[in-house]
Amino acid sequence: GGERGERGDWSASIPLPLKALNELCFGSLESLPGGKLRHSFPEEYAARAMDLLHYRYPGVGGESYMDLVTNCREVVLALERMRTDVAVVCDVAVARVLLGYFTGTPIEQIPEIAISPGLGLVELVRGHSGFSIEHHDIVDVGRPSLLAS
Protein backbone atom coordinates (compact mmCIF):
# COMPACT_ATOMS: atom_id res chain seq x y z
CA GLY A 1 0.00 0.00 0.00
CA GLY A 2 1.07 3.55 0.58
CA GLU A 3 1.32 6.68 -1.49
CA ARG A 4 2.84 5.44 -4.74
CA GLY A 5 -0.24 3.78 -6.19
CA GLU A 6 -0.94 0.36 -7.59
CA ARG A 7 1.62 0.42 -10.42
CA GLY A 8 4.67 1.21 -8.25
CA ASP A 9 5.29 4.62 -9.83
CA TRP A 10 8.42 6.08 -8.28
CA SER A 11 8.71 8.85 -10.92
CA ALA A 12 7.98 11.58 -8.38
CA SER A 13 10.68 10.27 -6.05
CA ILE A 14 13.85 12.13 -5.23
CA PRO A 15 16.93 9.90 -4.84
CA LEU A 16 18.95 10.66 -1.74
CA PRO A 17 22.41 9.06 -1.82
CA LEU A 18 23.64 8.18 1.65
CA LYS A 19 27.20 7.06 2.41
CA ALA A 20 25.84 4.84 5.20
CA LEU A 21 24.25 2.61 2.53
CA ASN A 22 27.58 1.84 0.84
CA GLU A 23 28.88 -1.72 0.90
CA LEU A 24 31.03 -3.10 3.69
CA CYS A 25 34.65 -2.07 3.04
CA PHE A 26 37.02 -5.04 2.80
CA GLY A 27 40.09 -2.87 3.53
CA SER A 28 43.29 -4.27 2.02
CA LEU A 29 41.29 -7.23 0.66
CA GLU A 30 39.02 -4.95 -1.43
CA SER A 31 40.53 -6.00 -4.78
CA LEU A 32 40.45 -9.73 -4.01
CA PRO A 33 38.41 -11.56 -6.67
CA GLY A 34 35.08 -13.05 -5.58
CA GLY A 35 35.28 -16.31 -3.65
CA LYS A 36 39.02 -16.12 -2.93
CA LEU A 37 39.08 -15.17 0.76
CA ARG A 38 38.96 -18.76 2.08
CA HIS A 39 41.85 -19.99 -0.09
CA SER A 40 44.02 -16.86 -0.37
CA PHE A 41 43.75 -15.71 3.26
CA PRO A 42 42.71 -18.72 5.36
CA GLU A 43 43.69 -16.98 8.63
CA GLU A 44 41.39 -14.04 7.85
CA TYR A 45 38.63 -16.40 6.79
CA ALA A 46 38.94 -18.31 10.08
CA ALA A 47 39.02 -15.11 12.17
CA ARG A 48 35.89 -13.85 10.40
CA ALA A 49 34.11 -17.17 10.92
CA MET A 50 34.80 -17.01 14.68
CA ASP A 51 33.05 -13.64 15.12
CA LEU A 52 31.00 -12.46 12.13
CA LEU A 53 29.64 -9.45 14.00
CA HIS A 54 32.90 -7.93 15.26
CA TYR A 55 35.44 -9.15 12.66
CA ARG A 56 36.96 -6.11 10.93
CA TYR A 57 38.63 -6.59 7.56
CA PRO A 58 42.36 -5.72 7.68
CA GLY A 59 43.86 -2.56 6.23
CA VAL A 60 42.80 1.04 5.82
CA GLY A 61 39.04 1.45 5.84
CA GLY A 62 38.34 -2.19 6.74
CA GLU A 63 34.94 -2.49 8.40
CA SER A 64 32.92 -4.89 10.52
CA TYR A 65 29.19 -5.50 10.80
CA MET A 66 29.28 -3.51 14.05
CA ASP A 67 30.67 -0.57 12.07
CA LEU A 68 27.71 -0.89 9.70
CA VAL A 69 25.27 -1.00 12.62
CA THR A 70 26.75 2.28 13.88
CA ASN A 71 26.80 3.83 10.38
CA CYS A 72 23.16 2.91 9.74
CA ARG A 73 21.70 4.52 12.88
CA GLU A 74 20.76 7.78 11.15
CA VAL A 75 19.25 5.88 8.21
CA VAL A 76 17.16 3.78 10.61
CA LEU A 77 15.92 6.91 12.38
CA ALA A 78 15.00 8.52 9.05
CA LEU A 79 13.16 5.38 7.91
CA GLU A 80 11.29 5.23 11.22
CA ARG A 81 9.94 8.74 10.59
CA MET A 82 8.74 7.98 7.03
CA ARG A 83 5.00 7.63 6.57
CA THR A 84 5.11 6.68 2.88
CA ASP A 85 6.69 3.87 0.90
CA VAL A 86 10.47 4.08 0.70
CA ALA A 87 12.86 2.31 -1.66
CA VAL A 88 16.33 1.71 -0.22
CA VAL A 89 19.07 0.59 -2.61
CA CYS A 90 22.01 -0.82 -0.70
CA ASP A 91 24.58 -3.56 -0.42
CA VAL A 92 23.71 -6.99 1.01
CA ALA A 93 25.55 -6.34 4.30
CA VAL A 94 23.69 -3.05 4.83
CA ALA A 95 20.41 -4.78 3.94
CA ARG A 96 21.11 -7.34 6.68
CA VAL A 97 21.61 -4.55 9.22
CA LEU A 98 18.39 -2.77 8.22
CA LEU A 99 16.36 -5.98 8.08
CA GLY A 100 17.80 -7.06 11.42
CA TYR A 101 16.71 -3.84 13.03
CA PHE A 102 13.20 -3.75 11.60
CA THR A 103 12.49 -7.42 12.30
CA GLY A 104 13.92 -7.39 15.82
CA THR A 105 16.66 -9.90 15.00
CA PRO A 106 19.25 -10.23 17.81
CA ILE A 107 22.34 -8.25 16.82
CA GLU A 108 24.58 -11.35 16.92
CA GLN A 109 22.46 -12.92 14.15
CA ILE A 110 22.52 -9.94 11.75
CA PRO A 111 25.55 -11.17 9.70
CA GLU A 112 23.71 -14.45 9.05
CA ILE A 113 20.40 -13.05 7.76
CA ALA A 114 19.71 -14.87 4.48
CA ILE A 115 19.65 -12.60 1.45
CA SER A 116 19.95 -13.96 -2.08
CA PRO A 117 22.89 -12.67 -4.11
CA GLY A 118 22.17 -10.63 -7.21
CA LEU A 119 19.49 -8.08 -7.73
CA GLY A 120 16.32 -8.66 -5.82
CA LEU A 121 13.78 -6.77 -3.84
CA VAL A 122 13.21 -7.28 -0.15
CA GLU A 123 9.96 -5.74 1.01
CA LEU A 124 9.29 -4.90 4.64
CA VAL A 125 5.57 -4.83 5.31
CA ARG A 126 4.47 -2.94 8.41
CA GLY A 127 1.85 -4.76 10.47
CA HIS A 128 0.27 -4.40 13.89
CA SER A 129 2.93 -6.60 15.51
CA GLY A 130 5.97 -5.27 13.63
CA PHE A 131 7.37 -5.98 10.20
CA SER A 132 7.24 -9.03 7.97
CA ILE A 133 9.62 -9.70 5.08
CA GLU A 134 8.71 -10.58 1.52
CA HIS A 135 11.40 -11.52 -1.05
CA HIS A 136 10.95 -10.73 -4.75
CA ASP A 137 13.53 -12.04 -7.25
CA ILE A 138 14.34 -9.70 -10.12
CA VAL A 139 17.58 -10.89 -11.76
CA ASP A 140 20.88 -12.49 -10.80
CA VAL A 141 23.82 -10.42 -12.04
CA GLY A 142 26.22 -13.35 -11.66
CA ARG A 143 28.83 -11.32 -9.75
CA PRO A 144 30.51 -13.59 -7.20
CA SER A 145 30.83 -12.52 -3.59
CA LEU A 146 34.25 -12.18 -1.96
CA LEU A 147 33.08 -14.83 0.49
CA ALA A 148 31.65 -17.35 -2.00
CA SER A 149 33.32 -20.73 -1.83
Image (spheres, rainbow, N blue to C red):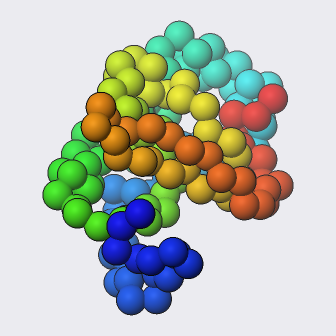
User: In the rendered image, is residue 88 in sight?
Assistant: yes
User: In the rendered image, is residue 55 in sight?
Assistant: no
Quarter of the image for the C terminus: give it.
top right
Residue 72 or residue 79, whichever sits in front? 79
Count of numbered circles in the view: 0
**Can you tell which quarter of the image residue 103 is in?**
top left
Q: Residue at the spot x=44%, y=77% of the render?
A: 5
Residue 22 or residue 26, whichever sits in front? 22
Quarter of the image for the N terminus: give it.
bottom left
Give the x, y percent position of residue 21: 40, 57
Q: Is residue 79 left or right of residue 143?
A: left
Please identify the residue farthest to the bottom as the structure is shown: 12
Q: Residue at the spot x=44%, y=27% of the render?
A: 110
Q: Residue at the spot x=76%, y=34% of the render?
A: 148
Give the x, y percent position of residue 14: 35, 84
Please identify the residue farthest to the top as the structure is shown: 50
Give the x, y percent position of residue 108: 39, 17
Q: Is residue 93 above or below residue 53?
A: below
Residue 14 or residue 2, whichever sits in front? 2
Q: Residue at the spot x=50%, y=40% of the render?
A: 133
Q: Is residue 122 left or right of residue 2?
A: right
Give the x, y percent position of residue 147: 69, 34
Residue 115 or residue 69, whichever sits in front? 115
Q: Is residue 31 above or below residue 141?
A: above
Q: Is residue 117 above or below residue 142?
A: above
Q: Is residue 38 left or right of residue 95?
A: right
